[in-house]
Image (cartoon, rainbow, N blue to C red):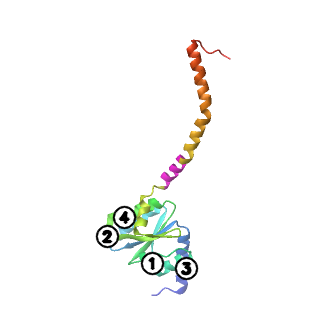
Amino acid sequence: MPITRSRKAELIASYKELIDNSYAVLVCEYRGINVGAMEKMRHALRQNDAQFIVAKKTLMMLALQEAGKPVPEEAMIGPVGFVFMGEDLAAAAKVLRDFAKEVGDGFTVHGGVLGDSLLDAAGALALADLPSRDVQLAQLVGAIVGPMTALASLVSAPHRDLIGLLQARIDKEGGEAEAA
């Protein structure tokens, strides 16, 4: 039974909302994968703020166009599903990479959209090589704290040096410091 025009409009609107709330959308081909394996992958994606859905390619292309995103037409080959990724792109991409290794040729990442840029298969899989969100935040904090620590050390250096000189003079004279 064909989908009615109003149902298509509803689906496009829901896909557009998913696109608008995602940092990236990846296109993945799946063939001959059992339901249990797919559910396991979906569960792992949900734990990493991502979602896998199977949608009609033409409706997803229309939703991408309505959202103002480029359409990865060359990635939409065969039976495909779409992964909508949240903030931690690396974690979700690692789940997909591991799942592809686990099931072999039955699951392939073909490409996708990151922001306003198209990704090919290599670019989409390269997201898995990024450090996780927590590691990126730690690196950012380190980059901010490092210069501040150096500045604090620089500002306190003259006082430290003066105290060191006075202590050396006291030690040289053989006396003890007087209590103030």
Check disc 4 and report its element: helix, strand or loop: helix
Residue 52, placed above or below residue 146: below
- Label 3 – label 4 distance at C-alpha: 31 Å
Image: magenta residue range: 133-142
Q: Along the horizontal axis of the image, is 31 left or right of 166?
A: left
**Which residue lies at the image location 61% right of the left edge and 30% below the top edge?**
158
Label 4 near label 1: C-beta < 8 Å?
A: no
Check disc 3 and report its element: helix, strand or loop: helix
Q: Can you tell which mark lies on residue 105?
A: 2
Q: What residue type is disc 1 on?
A: Glu
Q: Which residue is mark 3?
A: 10
Q: Along the horizontal axis of the image, is 93 left or right of 159?
A: left
Q: Which residue is mark 1?
A: 73
**Along the polypeptide, which appears first: circle 1 or circle 2?**
1
- Label 1 – label 4 distance at C-alpha: 24 Å
Q: Residues within 10 Å of mark 2 (few under 14, many from 20)?
A: few
Task: Please state which of residues 22 and 73 is positioned toward the viewer in this rendering.
Answer: 73
Q: Which residue is mark 4?
A: 99
**Along the polypeptide, which appears first: circle 3 or circle 1?**
3
- Coordinates of residue 107 in the picture (x, y in percent): 36, 70
